[in-house]
Image (tube, rainbow, N blue to C red):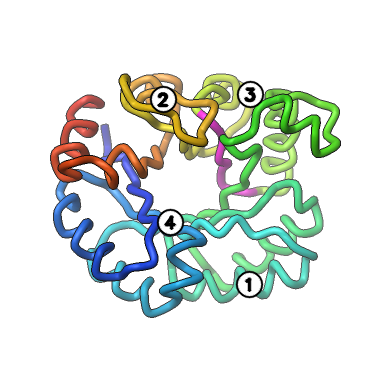
Amino acid sequence: MKRNPIFCAIDTNDINKATSLLTNIAPHIGGIKVGLEFFTSLGIKGIEEIKKFNKPLFIDLKLYDIPNTVAAALRNILALKPEYTTLHISGGRKMLENCVKEKIKANSSTKLIGVTMLTSFDDKEVNEIGIDRNVAENVNLLSGLAENCKLDGIVCSPHEISYIKSKFKLEVISPGIRLNDAQTDDQKRTLTAKEALNAGADILVIGRPITQADNPSDAARSIYESIQ
């Protein structure tokens, strides 16, 4: 294994809680993911505190809007120099292509990762919002668009990894990682860390199995040891 693929999802609005947690788990993780809860409460100052840990950063805001608006927002994210950031592929070709142009213009090394279908979705929920195809069909369709628009990778559930890796030349980031005996919470398409890596995942996003454990450091170490 070239590097630790575990990115811990730090979903909190308390910077002291975030930094205390990271101090404990830093030896056992490969990167840090921050999302909407963190960013909308702690903002740029919070990001700067997280960057002090010198871990690869994944800013996961899942941008989705008209092309010009998303490109402008992405410009600000690229200035923070994360390793990864996310866009909803369903924002469409023009939005995605504008973002790729923005990355090139900024001479940025940040990898643009397309979100396929949220891991909280199942076929019933997808149909309820007016999408006729099932989850697997949509993941395939959106992955093809991401590759065609020259994104660097996609986010998909562990259940779709093997198929995506067999068909597309895309980096795969996989949330929905759970322990063998863990509840899946609001995630519906999950696997263990080892199973996801065996399927071909490049990065594992792991939140609650670490952050809500009785001993987060032990939990992070145990998960890392399980994938050696």
Give, as a three-letter code, the residue at label 1: Ala
From this view, report whether residue 85 is shown above or below residue 149.
Answer: below
| Sequence order check, earlier mark of 1 and 2 | 1
| Sequence order check, earlier mark of 3 and 1 | 1
Tag 4 and tag 1, C-beta contact below 8 Å = no
Residue at label 4?
A: 58
Instruction: Work out whether residue 193 can be spotted.
Output: no
Horizontal and vertical percent position of residue 138: 74, 30
- CA distance separating discs 4 and 3: 25 Å
| Sequence order check, earlier mark of 2 and 4 | 4
Res 167 label: 3
Residue at label 1?
A: 73
Quarter of the N terminus within the rendering: top left
Residue at label 2?
A: 196
Give, as a three-letter code, the residue at label 3: Lys
| Sequence order check, earlier mark of 4 and 1 | 4
Horizontal and vertical percent position of residue 206: 36, 41
